[in-house]
Image: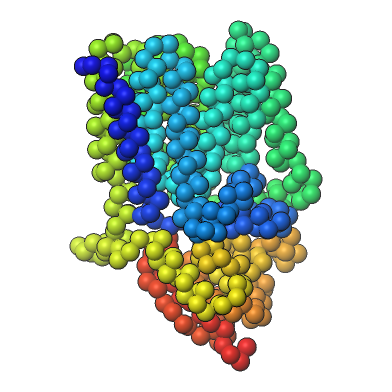
Amino acid sequence: MNRKLIPAIGIAAAALAVLLAALNMQHGNLNQDEGWYLYAAKMVRDGHAPYADFAFTQGPVLPHVYAIFYPVVDALGVAGGRLVTTIMGLLAALFAAATAWRLSEKNKSAAGVAVFLLVACNVYQSYFTTVVKTYGLCAFFLSVGFFALSFKNRWGALVCGALLALAAGTRLSAGVVLPVAGVWLLFQRERRLDWFWFGVGGGLVLLAVYLPFFVSAFEQTKFGLLEYHAGRDGGGLGKLLVLKTGFVSRFVQAYFIFTLLALATFCFSPRESFRNPFALLLWLCGAGISLVHLSANFPYDDYQAIAYPILATAVATSLLPQLKEKWIAPGLVLLLLSTTAAAFSSPVNMDWFVRGRDRIWWQFKEQNDLQTLREAAGVVRQNMPEKDVLLTQDTYLAVEAGVSVPSGMELGPFCYYPDMPREQAEQFHLLNREMLIQLLNQTDAPLAAFSGYGLAIECPAVAPVAENDAAEFAEIVEARFEKVEELASFGQAHTTLSIYKLKDSE
């Protein structure tokens, strides 16, 4: 088959990637994370610091980066945040492809196209680098970092160290790549002092990212980065094994084509697969991130979105050199066809238009999640002529409406720690039971809005709020507020959103 097909395959891959990104951006399910990440960016834009001034549970880089682009969110709402994230995700795929192009001694274009197909045209990867999470930005830093390292000079090593440190400052689990890459450089004789420059770039940026927060707000930073995540209990050995098995199973389902290619690489010629030392580095870094995620008490498969561009680059640079020349173009055609088939046979596609199933009947969406969010934000703005405080744990509604949430609710549904001592809760910008009841009784917020996530989750166990507490919270809300609107199928999990107005007597 003619190798001149490769550019055409690349164009088809680009078109498919843009189509999937656009569909996910417009029709992808809302996720609660989108609210508090964008709200954190708003807080930083307004001069507040993560940890010290509001609760935050990831590295500080994301809110500072998104604060720069917050005018896009002001103009477009949550869709603006998705647009920024989508660009980051597509750039991550492009730089992963460019890294494969640089690492390949021959068939450079084929390697780049293969990686782009695997990453940007995977609908699962596309969704999780479109919705506003840490994944798009973190994957971008990782991909550009390894691209920089492919240049065998001190500047490449310096820039790589800095970018991998920014990835670790976005999502802590990405930090494992720093020691792995540093040790790898020590064993690359032809790269001389690159390990030193890598360490300088990574070390200085890590200090710049984290040191100010640990100095100014040590306890709050430690809680947000470590204790918040460690506080969740997997529920015993049996449940933990089920969760970890499910993590692996869902990863295989989401990245099935990659999994088949990786198995082929390791099973048929494992020695040949590691002839390229850079490919070995990519495998080690991808595996390192994956093991960190697997070790979590609650290992979510979508965490792997940050590791996947690295792994896709590794499999392409390991497998392609082993193919005979005559199989390169046919192999890419097969990859394009199988990737397209997988992209449109995923559960993600169904989520664009279906919200669930009632017995044998599919429940179709009357409108997409963003449209429902905009409708709810319109109700908020209509009943709140001047921008004020909205009593809600659905922070994406506050972002969409351009209003604020009460202090202590910046973490959305996960701000409620019923048994935490008051002094500690105030220090960490959270709410214990006494503080939440006080807030509900005394707030002068003109509007309140609660979905199925509102006043429903208690931490650190991330368990349902006790029935008697839930009843007390509801009683206070009903006593002080009157319901003005109710929207079905709102937000994540498509629960009912109730919007309340403070009673005139208040």
Residue in front for this viewpoint, 409 or 284: 409
Q: Residue furthest top?
A: 190
Q: Residue at x 30, y 63 (%)?
A: 365
The number of discs equals 0
Q: Residue at x 48, y 35 (%)?
A: 91
Q: Residue at x 56, y 88 (%)?
A: 503
> For the N terminus, which image quadrant?
top left
Q: Is residue 401 visible in this depiction of the protein?
A: yes
Q: Residue at x 70, y 34 (%)?
A: 205
Q: Is residue 459 visible in this depiction of the protein?
A: no
From the top left corner, tell me how far across and down residue 315 is, in percent.
40, 23
Residue 377 located left or right of residue 24: right
Compared to residue 277, the image places residue 348 above or below, namely: below
Compared to residue 295, the image places residue 474 above or below, namely: below
> For the C terminus, which image quadrant?
bottom right
Residue 14 located left or right of residue 422: left
From the top left corner, tell me how far across and down residue 5 is, in percent.
26, 22
Residue in front for this viewpoint, 1 or 304: 1
Residue in front for this viewpoint, 291 or 78: 78
From the top left corner, tell me how far across and down residue 422 is, in percent.
72, 67
From the top left corner, tell me how far across and down residue 286 is, in percent.
49, 29
Write down the quadrant of residue 439 in the picture: bottom right
User: Which color mode does the image show?
Assistant: rainbow
Compared to residue 105, the image places residue 310 above or below, namely: below
